[in-house]
Amino acid sequence: MKPIEVLRKLIAVPGISSTNSEKNAGDVIYEIMSCIDYFKQNKEYLFKYPCRGDGFKRDVICGIIKGTSSKTIVLMGHYDVVGIEDYGNIKDFAFDIDNLPEKLKNFNLDDDAKKDLESGEWIFGRGSADMKASIAIDICLMYEFSKMPLNGNLVFLAVPDEESFSVGMRAAVPLLKDLKDRYGFEYELCIDGEPGQSVDGELIMSLGTVGKCMPVVMVQGEKAHISMCFDGLNPLGILSDIFRATELNLDFSDEYSGLKTMPPSWNYLKDMKYEYDVSLPIRASGYFSVLSFFSTPDETMAKLKKICNDCFLGYMDHMKDVYSKFLQGQESITVKPIEIETTVMEFAELLEYCKTLAGWEEFFNSLYSDIKNKIDSNELNLPLATLEFMARTLDFSSITKPLVLLAFAPPYYSPLISNNIKDKENKVSEYFEQVRETADKLFGMKIGSVECFSAMTDLSYCALDRSFDFESFGKNTPLWGEIYEINFDAIESINIPGILFGPWGKDYHRASERVYRPDVETRIPALKKSLIQYILY
């Protein structure tokens, strides 16, 4: 069993995230693993673990090789890929690693991609780097270790939906806890095979991953005809000020070990008026992403709440000032003083108020079911479903005064710096040194490291390096429950130090996506094998 042969089979099945083809990609992995003699003889150690409540019926593919001690390593990767629109008129070849290179010769590639294409040392195709090459390597490692005595255990996990909402890894967390409880596994390390980057000639291993939360801001104004705009309050004005005060605001940026998280970026900003007339919109809303190395959702909410209050007050002062100037020289106009109370409310506060109203429980159950059906039928994604949930809850409350309502939308990713995990401090630095020395010895290859990868990955669900108020976060996340949930208790229980380490890849999510052939065939398999032996023997 060779990684290139396995990779060819994996890429041939599209597995585009949040489509029906994604389940097929998982099925192919299961079929390939089923051909390994160990799993033919130990059928209970290879199985599909359904993602609970998933509309696409996707599975986590899990394989276990049992050894003689409790020490356990998890080999993990995601089998979904992004879409292929970027391939244009050659998209029919996006999943054909043998014929795609010829088609790319006439494609608009940059100079680096052209050079790599001509070299023959790179494998092109959607999912080649991100991240089916790593899954192919891990399958071959499972095959190899299944034929030798093992002083410890290997758990193979292939999960769906990493490119969207991490349905697969969130489902895998209780599975890993169950395996720990059932077999007495002591998790030493999770190797997430995300593609590596080359920096100054070094292939980079990441010893952690950045976190992300997505605050949602909904502003309720006061309706008025535009010819009498001072009688109302335009929510777009307040929301625009909140946007300007938060977009690229470095106060939200964390700094750790010489690294900084990118400042916030807004993903969505829009009024909530669905028809045209000449009145001010009643509501406007948006959401943005906040990356973190250590900041908690509560800390982010506190910063945002102050900014929203300041922006609300500032906009009211601006409105009063403009009104005062507007009135100058117009004696015939009846003056109406602008007096609006400034209210900034968290969704949890709105929820507590609604619970005191008659009919709330029946309304909530109906609303939750309706929103879930819309998500399952792809009518709404999770962030937009959050906005609808907030709006309909606000409607039920009968609160009509102007206000700013704050919440969180999925997905949420906890930051993880593996060296800081309690009782397992600096273990991953030890493992990095082993890989670095082995790479230099075997291949003259340079390996570097960073404490934290700058983008979101499924590694976030392996451990918590610090605690935060899970309950508070859930109350401020309208979809929390059956629609969206993270089992933080299980994450704390498994507490697996994790690294991101896979073959050198380039241009993920682009038509020139590619993975370095020598890393797939020899270098990464050898380095992973050596690390596994170092830990388990």
Image (cartoon, grey):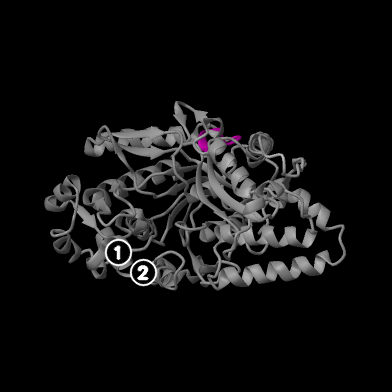
Is 485 placed left or right of 21 in the picture? Answer: right
Percent position (x, y) of residue 425?
54, 32
Tell me where the magenta segment starts and ends, as one range.
Answer: 417-423
Find residue 483 and report its image quarter: bottom right
Farthest-out residue, top: 258
For the residue pair 356 and 60, the one nearer the viewer reads as: 356
In this rendering, position of residue 284 left or right of residue 289: right
Residue 34: quarter of image: bottom left
- Residue 312 in magenta? no
- For residue 364, the mark is none
Q: Is residue 488 above or below residue 32?
A: above
Q: Nearer the viewer, residue 101 or 274?
A: 274
Query: Helix or strand or loop: what does disc 2 sit on?
Result: helix
Q: Answer above or below: position of 152 versus 52.
A: above
Marks 1/2: CA distance?
Answer: 8 Å
Which amino acid, mark 1? Val
- Which residue does the numbered mark 1 point to in the structure image? 6
Say which residue label 2 marks: 32
Q: Would you call the spot at circle 1 few (<14 residues within 10 Å), some (14-19), or many (20 or more)? A: some
Residue type, label 2 = Ile
Residue at 56% over, 49% down: 287
